[in-house]
């Protein structure tokens, strides 16, 4: 049997990792500013994380949601405390797509409606509903296509108001990333998020804050959306939640009243997943990682804006997009294979920085030095 070939792969095998560094099979050291796509939030093989998981595995690794799992209660309490949403409710799943899928389903159960508003540039996952609200027709299979999704221009308040005025009583939910990831690190404006909140209140629609990539402290706030000063009805989270262990969840406002069987999952909230998620929150809290993400992120953004070769620097905290001109399309590849630095990308020419939240200033300076050489063509071979 062969692997189903759907991933374009770099010819690199990672064999060990620590903090913000990884090593390949040839013992070449790399700086990881990609974090496995915003997943590594507290650093690779963090000692507290490893200890938490190892200890839990020696007791019980898994049992289903048919029994009490005190770790779930502990996680909910800690998450409420760190996120500032103490009165919200937690439902645990395994991935960001599942989180968004369940959030949309919950909204439809709540108000009995079908229409969902999503936005240009959005990416919410690859499961049925999640991909239907994703703005990429290429990955939407015929079976996923639906007339229930309304795509509107990102950050366009007039289009949003007009759509609610025309169809407000049919709209179940509005789903939006606080900062679009795949869409190129584009931030929702404060007034746009506030408008979503007010219109959802007026029409009894559900405001879903997709925090899968932009949440979990990455921007300096626990949820990126919170800088707008309004609360969403449902926050979805994944990626950095487990520092590499598959765990995700939705944080649900108190106005939603659950009933048995409404949502369900086999693996969601298992013992190991909860241990991983608790370890992440404990390290985030102990080491003030949201503050560090804000400070190091501000430093990187300030320094990157000084490069005249850069078209635009976007983002907040340690979720940064660097838009480059076409003639510098080689920079991401050069950073990896010449300077040994992992970064992410968004089409057509945006470099994405999604490092661990405990990234140091020394690591930031290492990147800035390499980036300067790459964009100035120092040592570059055409």
Image: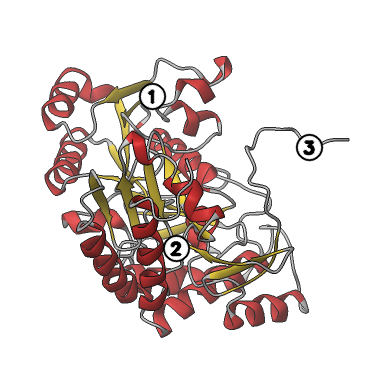
Instruction: Judge left or right: residue 294 versus residue 138.
Output: left
Residue, disc 2? 355
Q: From this viewpoint, is residue 125 visible?
A: yes
Tell me how far mark 1 sits from mark 3, CA to CA.
37 Å
| Mark-to-mark CA distance, 3 and 2 | 28 Å
Q: Position of residue 83 (x, y in %)?
A: 34, 67
Instruction: Kindly report which numbered mark, 1 or 3, lies closer to the viewer in this rendering.
Output: 3
Whole-number angstrom distance, CA of label 1 to CA of label 2: 37 Å
**Front-lying residue, 77 or 66:** 77
Please name the residue shown 70% across and 69% down the image. Answer: 27
Mark positioned earlier in the residue sequence (3 or 2): 3
Label 1 neighbour load within 10 Å: few <14, some 14-19, many 20+: some
Counting residues from the start of the chain, the first of labels 1 and 2 encountered is 1
What residue appears at the point 62 percent right and 74 percent down from the top-left corner? 45
Element type at marker 3?
loop
Does any portion of residue 217 appear in the rendered image? no
Residue on which the image places disc 1: 114
Residue that protrudes farthest toward the right in the picture: 1
What SS does tag 2 mark? loop
Q: Quadrant of residue 127?
A: top right
Looking at the rendered structure, the secondary structure element under dot 1 is loop
The residue that label 3 is drawn on is: 3
N-terminal of the two: label 1 or label 3? 3
The image shows residue 71, relative to residue 32, as above or below, that is: below
How are the residues colored?
secondary structure
Please tell me whether residue 341 is drawn above or below residue 191 in the rendered image: below
């Amino acid at each position: 049997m062969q692997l189903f070939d759907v991933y374009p792969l770099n010819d690199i095998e990672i064999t060990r990792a620590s903090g913000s560094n990884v090593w390949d099979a040839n013992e070449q050291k790399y700086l990881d500013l990609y974090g496995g796509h915003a997943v590594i939030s507290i650093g690779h093989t963090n000692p507290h994380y490893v200890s938490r998981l190892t200890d839990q595995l020696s007791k019980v690794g898994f049992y289903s949601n048919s029994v009490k799992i005190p770790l779930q209660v502990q996680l909910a309490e800690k998450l409420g405390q760190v996120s500032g949403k103490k009165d919200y409710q937690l439902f645990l799943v395994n991935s960001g797509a599942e989180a968004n899928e369940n959030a949309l389903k919950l909204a439809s159960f709540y108000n009995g409606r079908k229409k969902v508003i999503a936005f240009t540039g959005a990416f919410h996952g690859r499961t049925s509903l999640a991909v239907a609200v994703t703005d990429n027709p290429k990955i939407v299979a015929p079976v996923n296509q639906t007339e229930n999704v309304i795509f509107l221009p990102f950050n366009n308040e007039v289009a949003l108001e007009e759509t609610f005025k025309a169809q407000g009583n049919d709209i179940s939910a509005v789903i939006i990333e606080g900062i679009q990831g795949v869409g190129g690190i584009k931030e929702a404006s404060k007034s746009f998020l506030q408008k979503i909140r007010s219109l959802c209140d007026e029409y009894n629609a559900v405001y879903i804050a997709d925090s899968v990539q932009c949440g979990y402290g990455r921007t300096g706030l626990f949820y990126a959306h919170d800088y707008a000063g309004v609360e969403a009805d449902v926050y979805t989270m994944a990626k950095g939640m487990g520092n590499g262990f598959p765990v995700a969840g939705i944080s649900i406002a108190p106005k939603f009243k659950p009933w048995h069987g409404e949502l369900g999952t086999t693996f969601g909230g298992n013992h190991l997943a909860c241990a991983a998620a608790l370890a992440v929150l404990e390290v985030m809290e102990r080491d003030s990682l949201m503050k560090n993400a804000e400070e190091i992120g501000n430093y990187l953004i300030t320094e990157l804006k000084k490069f005249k070769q850069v078209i635009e620097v976007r983002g907040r905290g340690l979720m940064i997009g660097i838009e480059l001109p076409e003639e510098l399309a080689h920079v991401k590849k050069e950073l990896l294979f010449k300077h040994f630095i992992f970064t992410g990308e968004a089409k057509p020419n945006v470099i994405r920085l999604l490092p661990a939240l405990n990234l140091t200033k020394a690591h930031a300076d290492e990147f800035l030095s390499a980036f300067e050489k790459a964009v100035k063509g120092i040592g570059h071979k055409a």
